């Protein structure tokens, strides 16, 4: 089957992977043909694509599966490792894989709508909190996965090479780096986190919910909730909604509120800088920097940390 990959998808992966993306795109048609032959698949039109090729498919016996082809080898290894370590009732199952070519055959989640489709924000957050509570496990030894130290190093690189991350000031980046360093040195017990668990990575699976697309991250449990806090924010009352979400996570997962607020602030700064590096500014992320500043002033004396 011939595919016309979306221009935005091509632009995204070229922007991230450069020459590696160009080579991958040149070999794409052959790779898809090989997948159909090797696994007996009939591959359908892909889902909405971001940075990897993901499409529904049927096998020769009529079973429904999902084909995922990951461009970056390191990212593929991290996702596969995380899926296997986090394997359980809340995690999508890996049915087959090819490390060399970044291929995964995954179970098809049905009905498959994302958590983003639930309009009641508190209800959605409660679902997410209960899934996270079951999902997170103590960090394995020698997992070779990224850690929160990598996030610290990313902030340090941004600060040291600061030219223009406006409207994020160098002083704000320095503050976020300082907070991240303090939090990283005070982790009581490290855990294996999903690392990117937001509304669009939680799918309805019958009467339960299943997570997809883990990044795999070693860190404190409070870090797991920050990506959710930055996503699917309303146009109005952002601070109130964020505070309600934090209340639910703290209550259900028995988290430290101060660490959640500090992680939220520092990661909002980092995530916003990442979007600027990608050539655009995510207004929602930018807004949350101020939201977390306000909440930090409400609950703790942030200035005392500096």
Image (spheres, rainbow, N blue to C red):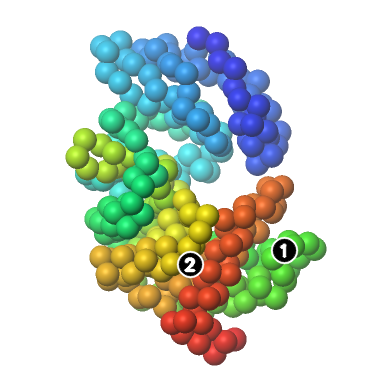
Q: Residue at x 27, y 69 (%)?
A: 251
Q: Residue at x 55, y 11 (%)?
A: 2
Q: On the picture, is 152 further left or further right than 135?
A: right
Residue 66 lies in quadrant: top left
* Rendered-image quadrant of the C terminus: bottom right
Give the crowd class for mark 1: few <14, some 14-19, many >=20 residues within 10 Å: few
Residue 298 position (above or below residue 140)? below
Q: Residue furthest toward the left?
A: 207
Work out whether 2 lies above or below 287: above
Local crowd size for mark 2, using a 10 Å CA cut-off: few (<14), some (14–19), many (≥20) = some
Q: Position of residue 6 (x, y in %)?
A: 61, 25
Q: Is residue 77 left or right of residue 172?
A: left
Earlier residue among tags 1 and 2: 1
- Of residue 235 and residue 45, the one placed in the foreground of this image is 235
Q: Nearer the viewer, mark 1 or mark 2?
A: 2
Residue position for label 2: 239
Residue 35: horizontal and vertical position, in percent? 45, 17
Q: Secondary structure at mark 1?
A: loop
Q: Nearer the viewer, residue 59 or 81?
A: 59
Residue 102 higher or lower than 210, as above or below: above
Residue drawn 59% across the image and 78% down it: 178
Q: Mark 1 — residue?
A: 167
């Amino acid at each position: 089957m011939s595919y016309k990959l979306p221009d935005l998808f091509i632009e995204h992966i070229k922007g991230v992977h450069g020459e590696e993306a160009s080579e991958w795109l040149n070999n794409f048609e052959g790779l898809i043909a090989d997948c159909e032959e090797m696994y007996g698949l009939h591959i359908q039109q892909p889902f909405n694509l971001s940075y990897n090729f993901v499409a529904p498919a049927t096998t020769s016996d009529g079973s429904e599966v999902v084909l995922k082809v990951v461009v970056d080898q390191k990212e593929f290894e991290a996702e596969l490792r995380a899926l296997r370590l986090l394997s359980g009732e809340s995690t999508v199952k890996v049915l087959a894989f090819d490390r060399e070519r970044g291929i995964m055959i995954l179970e098809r989640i049905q009905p498959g709508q994302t958590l983003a489709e639930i309009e009641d924000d508190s209800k959605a957050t409660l679902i997410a909190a209960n899934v996270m509570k079951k999902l997170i496990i103590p960090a394995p030894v020698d997992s070779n996965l990224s850690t929160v130290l990598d996030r610290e190093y990313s902030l340090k690189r941004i600060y040291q090479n600061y030219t223009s991350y406006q409207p994020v000031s160098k002083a704000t980046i320095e503050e976020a780096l300082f907070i991240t360093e303090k939090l990283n040195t005070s982790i009581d017990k490290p855990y294996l986190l999903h690392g990117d668990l937001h509304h669009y990575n939680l799918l309805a699976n019958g009467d339960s919910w299943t997570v997809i697309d883990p990044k795999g991250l070693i860190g404190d449990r409070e870090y797991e909730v920050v990506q959710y806090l930055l996503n699917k924010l309303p146009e109005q009352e952002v601070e109130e909604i964020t505070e309600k979400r934090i209340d639910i996570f703290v209550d259900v997962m028995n988290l430290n509120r101060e660490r959640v607020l500090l992680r939220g602030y520092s990661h909002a700064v980092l995530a916003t800088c990442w979007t600027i590096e990608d050539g655009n500014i995510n207004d929602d992320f930018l807004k949350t920097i101020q939201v977390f500043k306000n909440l930090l002033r409400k609950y703790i004396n942030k200035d005392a940390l500096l």
